[in-house]
Image: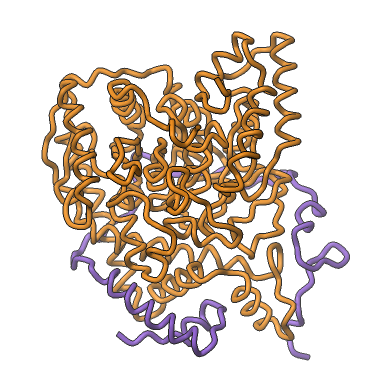
Chain colours: A purple, B orange
Amino acid sequence: MEIDIKRLARLAKLKFTPEEEEKYAAQMANIVAMVEKLPDLDASGPLIDPDNPMEFRKDEVEKKYSRDELLANAPEVQAGCVVVPKTVAE
Amino acid sequence: MELYRLTASELSRMMQKKEVSSVEVTRSVFDRIAKKEPEIEAYITLNEQAALQKAAEVDEKRAKGEPLSPLAGIPVGVKDNICVKGLPATCASKMLENFIPPYNATVIEKLNAQDCVYTGKLNMDEFAMGSSTETSYFKKTRNPFDLSRVPGGSSGGSAAAVAAGEAVVALGSDTGGSIRQPAAFCGVVGLKPTYGSVSRFGLVAFASSLDQIGPFGRSIEDVAMLYSAICGKDPYDTTTARREYPRFEAGFSADMQGVKIGIPDAYFGKGVSDEVRRLVMQAAHKYEEMGAALVPVTLPEPDYGLAAYYIIACAEASSNLARYDGVKYGYRTKNYKTLDEMYENTRSEGFGDEVKRRIMLGTYVLSSGYYDAYYKKAKFTQKLMEGMFREAFQKADFILSPTAPDTAFQFGENSDDQVKMYMNDILTVTANIAGLPALSFPCGFDSKGMPAGCQLIGGKFTEQRLLNAAYAYEKAAGGFDLSRTLD
């Protein structure tokens, strides 16, 4: 099974050196061979647990955290906003 | 008697009788940390000053005669993927090296309400991905029974700290065995609760449909006490179940008369070492002596479980870890011009090898053209497995198996062969896939002197039954022997 490491890396926003690509291709081939051991079966139907249904909470705004507290972990902040490189061409 | 050696329930009773104070207990644990930490390296962050301050507060409350919970003043260690406000939560990753959560996980809010004392944040595999704690960005934690061996993983720091007396009890998380396997490797007790019984709010997500927080302890009673304190419905985690939970430690029954224990042949078969098989079967026969019956049950092929697990877990991880983009929190590369470069370099520099491998595998199984062959098949296998467990529980009250195929291995032994490393999880992943509670308790030592773990798996929300059975074994065995790691 040929695994296109370059394409996957692009999708996952990761970058590898050519040596790393080679290493990952070999390792992933082994892992994929392991996970291919699955039975062919059709068990379609809902994948939910009827005994323990999920409950959503009301969509209400709660004031729990201050903006400063939340931004304290951001790598770069200006005037209460996170800073990112330019995203739109002029 | 050194206080750090005692269990939470023993310390709790002594504190209630005012024979010792929480400050004395906490000091004893930090003295122990100072002595053992250079060789064990279980902690990423220590919390000594705040812990002693909290202990003093608890002592003051007690002196005033305020009503206190049994866990009040008990030193608890916390795995580093669980958010404690103001303490770093690194997930043992360079990506979150400087992340300080502005909020508490729900389990921490619950333990705060019980006046617990936090010793610090415990080492783990990076983002909980691993079975030996070797993928941590910061350090390697050593097994207290043999410093040349791994403590298991991913909650290796939690298991090692409890075994070595560097914490009285600890919290870990279990996505595919990350509580039970390190508990087995370090000779302590670990419980992976039913999916939906403990809130995941404030637990850094790995595979959200499988992750569950759970307790470590040196006795069944301690694990039951900590579990009673953290379970329950949480509006901040939709997947938590609405139901009433008892105080588990109050309801112990060691009566095994007429109990039916399911023995799945396939879980004792190929890959399981002879010594582990013998020790676990000895535990099974001990139950027979107590009046239980062993009945054969058929469970899903362990190979299928492992395959389905790695597909589902990695698929969810690749989505969950997309949030590490260098924008809102965490590491950001210095080396970029465009937005895409920032994303790619941030993630490539911030994540370790194992995390990248799993993101790549998850991306692969979800990518167009492969979804049906992998993810969909894995979800079907999950349903098949749930059905087989339901059938098994018609015949047996719970299932008994080894926790891991072998006892703790040496550092580096499995690092170059991922598939061999993943085989460590082969007996634990099925409980996560089926959402079931499972517990590991120590059942003796192999010829190398390393502890083996016996796993009990029950139907959903049957934690009390599992705790009872483990308690019956503990009583019959005269307790779990940690004299070598606590000395």
Percent position (x, y) of residue B75? 61, 31
Percent position (x, y) of residue B255? 25, 18
Q: In this view of the protein, can residue B202 be seen by the observer? A: no
Percent position (x, y) of residue B245? 44, 26
Residue A5, compared with residue B57, is above or below; it is below
Where residue A23 sits, quadrant-wise, is bottom left
Residue B413, compared with residue A56, is above or below; it is below
Q: In this view of the protein, can residue B2 be seen by the observer? A: yes
Residue B129, compared with residue B171, is above or below; it is below
Front-most of B103 and B295?
B295
In-image side of B456 versus B164 (left or right):
left
In-image side of A44 versus B315 (left or right):
left
Q: Residue drawn 66% across and 22% down?
A: B22
In-image side of B256 versus B174 (left or right):
left
Quarter placement of the N terminus of chain B:
top right
Q: Residue drawn 32% across and 29% down?
A: B470
Percent position (x, y) of residue B411? 44, 60
In-image side of B78 versus B196 (left or right):
right
